Amino acid sequence: MRASKASKLALWLLIAIAVPISCLMKGWLNEADDRSAVSALADSRAKLDLRMNSGDGPRILIGGGSNALSSFDSAYISKQIGLPVYNLGLLSEGLDVRNMFAVVEARARPGDIVVISALSFLTHRDGTPNASLTKLAGGDWYLPMHGVDLSLPQGSFHIPLMSLFDELTLLNGLKTYAQWHSSAPVIESLEGTGNAEDHALRLPGNHHSVVINHQGDWIDCTQTSNAKPLEFDPKLLERSQGFTELADDFERRMNRRGVKVLFTLPTVLIHEKDRSRWEAQVVAVMKQFDSASFIHPNRNWQLNSDATQFCDTNAHMLRANATLNSEPLIHAVQLLLGVASR
């Protein structure tokens, strides 16, 4: 009996020690992963900036997350409208969505038209409350922090901690850390068959690499895989309030600069059984914005229930569909400019 009690006590002591150590380790791994990811994003944007049109005249800038990278054909849009087009979308929506908006804001100039397509409209990401604005080679970026800052007489002390609801175990965290830190070089320039503008960049991800062309489009999202539908979130409006406020503030700042902003919901994979609920949800989301600022694509296409239209996730469209997905954007910009379809 005593041995049994001693064994239970030893087990509890082990748990009491292992859990906080695991939390500290996982928090440190999260912060290390995010620093690598944000650094890669900053460096890739700096490289792509060299390819942006620096001449006078308006441009179309597409901002958003990885869904924006995979969902549009910038060359086709440019041909139809007659303006230079650049995709400024970021993987993982910049790790902190303020980075997503900041990338566009740092590059937009009077006369430009900005189109924002972000998964955050249909999920509940917003800025990380204790993110640290960090100076990197590609500029100042918000670096998500996974911990708490303590104010001590000796100064501020940061303790990295995993989230209580972090879906990744420490073991998976170690695996992800190894994947990020084994990627060398971080950004690889790929030789093209034509002039320098045809060259692409390969960016490392924590699951696979992504090839971006000279206009910023993700061009190797070409094979259908087992994408899982986006789960319906009945509390979306409540949880997405932070993102809505960020988007609203961004539009006001851009308008003051003489930049026109349009928003569009991403094309996502859904369960057909949830379609009516998604329809109502989408209408509610759009009501939070000026209706003139929102692009209204075909809802059956936007809320897509055909998994064969997507590659690795529920918001990454196959490259073959990027042209079709660009049509609503083209139509909205042509209306804005008062020009007829080419």
Image (cartoon, rainbow, N blue to C red):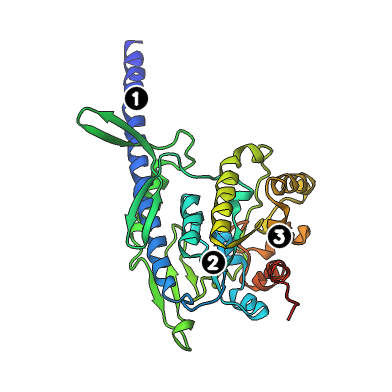
Task: Give the residue at mark 1.
Answer: 16
The amino acid on which the numbered mark 2 sits, given as a three-letter code, is Pro
Residue 295, numbered label: 3
| Left or right: where 297 falls relative to 112 | right
- Please say if 103 is above or below 233: below
Work out whether residue 310 or residue 94 is closer to the camera in this orientation and state it: 94
Task: Give the residue at mark 2.
Answer: 110
Q: In the displayed image of the protein, which residue is found farthest to the left?
A: 154
Placement of the C terminus among the 4 image quadrants: bottom right
The amino acid on which the numbered mark 3 sits, given as a three-letter code, is Ile
Write down the quadrant of residue 137 in the picture.
Answer: bottom left
Residue 173, numbered label: none
- Please say if 197 is above or below 167: below
The amino acid on which the numbered mark 1 sits, given as a three-letter code, is Ala
Q: Nearer the viewer, mark 3 or mark 1?
A: 3
Write down the quadrant of residue 315 in the picture.
Answer: bottom right
Question: Whole-Å distance between the Cαs marked 2 and 1?
Answer: 58 Å
| Left or right: where 208 falls relative to 296 | left
Secondary structure category for the residue under label 3:
loop
Secondary structure category for the residue under label 1:
helix
